[in-house]
Amino acid sequence: MAKWYDYPQYFDMLFRDETPVEVEFFEAAFERFAKCRVKRLLEPGCGSGRLVVALAAKGYDVTGIDLSPAMLKYTERKLKRRQLHATCVLGDMTSIEAKKPYHAAFCTYNTFRHLLTEKDAVTHLQTLADAIAPGGLYILGMHLTPEEEYDAVTERFTIKHAGTELKTTISVPETDEKKRLETLRVKLVAKRKSGDKIKIESEFPLRLYTPTQLKRLFKKVSDRWELVESFDFAYDIDDPLPFDSELLEGLFVLRRKG
């Protein structure tokens, strides 16, 4: 059975419709909340590079970091095809370095939750703060866990693009609340125009955060970051939401202190 991250083109398909909405939100947030002119951008865990490419096309100086060589090669091919430039770095989210400060960073759709321990999460936020200019932003998005007991939901959807049909099932077969980990299972069936089918299945752990637990994490790095505003996955810059127990699709704008 093939693995998800070995097929960046299908990973890209899953989120491509979200890209214009995210980019519009990012630019509005840069304008509204940053205390510096935003030019240099960083995406930790950039995956297939859909946001790296989209923002490079807008004229930003973008760097994407990821642990997957296949994802980075796919990003580089997309950049070359569109005659764009961005920097692709094979690296870890817990050891971010910058020769020159970035003005903003973004990490959406649960990528942050691949950091499986509190120590790694804190280290990421601290090292990122060292790489971001004072007044710069970090836009962080993730699903949060309800404070009360809940049943995990299985998602099924079909996407069609350029002659390829992608049927996707996302489920959570295992949850360990004590360790604050859940196992995410992703199954995809890609049917090409030629009639060929590829079946892909991957499982990987993600760290769990209730709203209270995420607030506690932010407090640990409050000497470097301030929470400016919170939103949800509607990406509506004019509709901020309170960071309370009801916010389970969290989109947070953090600003570098100093």
Image: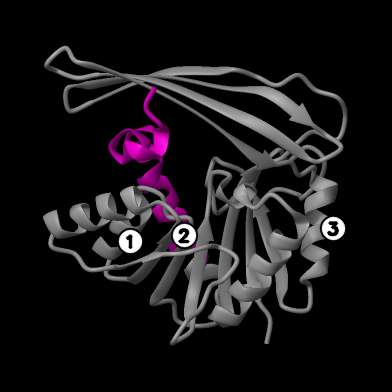
Residue at image coords 51%, 78%: 97
- In terms of secondary structure, what is the magenta stretch mainly? helix
Q: In the current view of this chain or complex, which residue is farthest to the front?
A: 1
The answer to whether 84 appears left or right of 230 in the picture is: left
Local secondary structure at mark 1? helix
Q: Which range is magenta?
A: 1-29
Q: Which three-letter amino acid code belongs to the residue tagged 2? A: Phe
Local secondary structure at mark 2? helix
The quadrant in which residue 100 appears is bottom left
Instruction: Report which residue position mark 1 lands on.
Output: 55
Q: Position of residue 75 (x, y in %)?
A: 28, 54
The quadrant in which residue 87 appears is bottom left
Residue 129 makes an appearance in the image: yes
Q: Position of residue 36 (x, y in %)?
A: 51, 83
Q: Are marks 1 and 2 in contact (CB under 8 Å)?
A: yes
Residue at image coords 29%, 57%: 53
Q: Few, some or many C-alpha atoms within 10 Å of disc 3 (few <14, some 14-19, many ≥20)? A: few
Residue at image coords 64%, 66%: 124
Instruction: Report which residue position mark 3 lands on.
Output: 216
Is 245 or 126 nearer to us in this picture? 126
Disc 3/disc 2 C-alpha distance (Å): 25 Å
Instruction: Report which residue position mark 2 lands on.
Output: 26
The quadrant in which residue 164 appears is top left
